[in-house]
Image: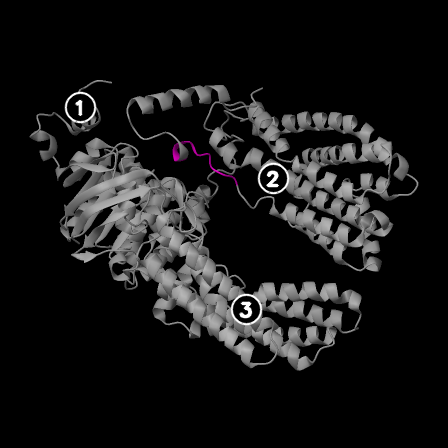
Amino acid sequence: MKVQLYKRGTVKRLKGAVRERVRSQGKKSAKGKWWKTPAGARGAGLFYLGFLLINIGRLWLMDAAKHERTQAVVLCSLSLVLAGVTLGQSRGLWGKLTSGGERTVLLFYPMEDGDFYSWATLRFVAKTTWIVVLAAVVYFFAGRATGASAWALRVSAPVAEWLLVLCATLALACHLDKWPRWLPWGMYAAALLLLFLPQQYASTMEPLGFVLPTGWLHWLMVNSATRAWAGWVAVMLVPALGELGWWLWKRLGEVYCALQAPVYEAEDTGTKGTVAEGAGEGLRDLPATLIAEERSEEELLEELAEEELGGATLPMGAAWRKQRLENWSGEVGQYVLQGDWAQGWEWKSLGWIEWAGRLCLNSRENGEAQFLLGPQAPRWSGRWKIAVIATAVAFAATLPGNSSLNVVAALAFAVSIGFGVPLLGGAWPATNPGRISGKFSPIFGCYPLSYWTASWTVYKLNAVRIVAWVPLGMLIGILGARSAHMDLGAGCWLAGRGILLLLALMPVLLAGKFSKGSNDTVNLRLATIPLIGVVIVVLTVEIILGSMAMMMEGVAVPCVAIAGTAAIAWGAWALYGVYYERGRVDLLRERQ
Amino acid sequence: MRIEIAGVSKHFGGIWALEEINLELEPGQVAGLLGANGAGKTTLLNCLAGIVAPSAGKIYYDGEVFHRGKMELRRRLMYLPDFPMAFARMNVLQHIAMCVRLYERPEPDAEVVAKILEQLNILVYAGMPLGTMSRGQLYKAALAGLLVVDPELWILDEPMASGMDPMGITYFKREAKAATQRGRTVVYTTQILEIAEKFSDRICVLDHGGLRLNGKAGELWGGADKNSLEEVLVNLRDPDGKR
């Protein structure tokens, strides 16, 4: 069993030899960049960190150790999160084993499937140890018992919970079709909801959390009859779960190796190999008409070849000829010749917001917008409808005047804003990174896209979306004011200020869209220091002015603050545009 | 398009990828950039395309200073990196239509496009998402976009090692040669010396970020008492013949 792809000692020895060689040649030092290890995804654990902080804050505020109900809610919430983690991890594990980047790369090397399985799963297990930390922190704050049992619980329960998650992950990894993809996110959403729902609603959700495989240990911890010996149960669980995990790991390995093993059948029907299944699926996806016509074309091909070559048929020429016949007689050939594909999409047919957006664009901007939006036509009208539904839910939640439903209304407001408004400048796939010479560059980098016209196009389309959302924003303002027992006009004005502020800040957000594909904020060097200084000043001033716009009373001061925000945002946008277009930044990054 | 590279240098941190490159290319030429891995070929192409900006020096197209913001110049050139930039979920036709629109070319003649796709042997895959294609097919799709746009300057990174089949490479070479007859300039990198010798009108050899050789194909080694381009390149790195 190989669980290491290479020996660290060998690498160290080779590195030393190379250093020596480099030094002896009098070349540059081998420090720094040459040996830099690529950093992983920085934001990978942010969600769990966020959950942990929310949990701690919640426990702190509610003094969980003294409130039995709160302890139950928090532990139930943790059960839901860990169940979501289990589902997500099992999909992730199976993906790593079957179609992940490491699998793809190592397919090209002589490595046994079993060895790859061992290597990949052990790496996977090592990366899940954060669950122990998460559970330990929550148990430490939520624990109510004292004495030896309490410490047995605090030490062994996080490990037991981690092993539970691992066992469930291993058991579920090859049964991914049994649950929908969104289920883990549903679990996370339920967990967060549980933390903020009023007690009477949270109680109804608790059984759901405790019946989950990740929840019964928590049930032991909160149940008054079992609480005293829950710690000792956890202690005994650790070896038992370890053994179960080991068995499940071996079992999954057998299933995986059996599925990965190539099967070759030397039969008349042809060869089949499980390894190649799925690969190049699209390539085989020829129009049915071509396949149906193949036989007659072959006959025709023979005749034509005989005519042209006087009976001497060249294999390459014949193949070309056959392909040519297939191409032109097929549906694809006909479609290409029609020429409709060059027209792009028809905005009017997409929805009223898209149609309104198109009205604001000239011909060139239309082309740039279609490029920036990538292969898929926008669904802004559809998103607006979801925002309408969310606003209606918020309306319904605030109607009875029950303050305990304010959380639901707030969540609905958030959904409405998230779907209806391009909060961070919107999604523009052309700004996404693509690989280029081992680094990453935004897709627009290889095409003639002007910073000025492209960002102006995006600004106009975003403005249309924001304007379309204004009635919903006003309604939200009114509902918020009603819940907070404020003047309805003040609520409207608050919402209006928020909308105007977003429009004012949009240029900075658009500059950020271009900035994210460049190297201006990485590889700090002399030339970028002034830029970073300007960015810090701009952001500070914008935050101050934005806060003034939203918090100050009256009309004049907020209006001036919004105007100031807009002026600075446009100035920063123009400044960055000059910096960008002059090529002061590279459109190459080492990481995505 | 006349290209003038005047004292162009580029460094990434402490590493100089290019050091004072001076080069002039007349229109209607195929220029091959040769050199060892890490010699700076791709960086030079990136500079020519505006992806990266030179740390020092300037690039002139037809006497006009080039930088990323000059859209009228950028619409006159097209860059195909080693892995062409394209949307994985777009199909070949959508990609071509996108290129035509961004380069502000008139609506393409469907017959011509179909002919190009057929010649590249990807006509049947015209409706296939680019993300599902093999590397060679993807390069052909991007090349089809370039051929339809027909820019004045073609910048291609390793087209001969792009995964294209021999028919695709032959077609590309034929089209590139035809393009130079129309006054287009083709700048490409390769590691295949035999192709470079026969296909290029001009060969530029880079090494350690510097331009070491520059001249018409056949003249570079003929007068230097060397037998082949291969020997010239080996001699650059190892002038004493020692290893």
Of all chains, the one bearing label 2 is: A
Relative to residue A284, is residue B182 depicted above or below?
below
| Mark 2 surroundings within 10 Å by alpha-carbon count, few (fewer than 14), some (14 through 19), many (20 or more) | some
Q: Is residue A548 visible?
A: yes
Picture coordinates of residue A532 (x, y %)? Answer: 43, 54
From the viewer's side, name the closer residue of B100 and A212. Answer: A212
Q: Let me know if residue A134 is in the magenta part.
A: no
Rounded to the nearest angstrom, the CA distance separating label 1 from label 3 is: 66 Å
In the rendering, which numbered label is found on residue A92? 2
Which residue in the rendered view is the most extreme toward the right?
Answer: A225
Left or right? Give the position of A197 relative to B17: right
Label 2 close to label 3 by CB (< 8 Å)? no
Which residue is the site of mark 1?
Answer: B239
Which residue is the site of mark 3?
Answer: A546
Instruction: Choose the circle earlier in sequence order: 2 or 3.
Output: 2
From the viewer's side, name the closer residue of A9 and A94. Answer: A9
**Which amino acid, mark 2?**
Gly
From the viewer's side, name the closer residue of B214 and B94. Answer: B214
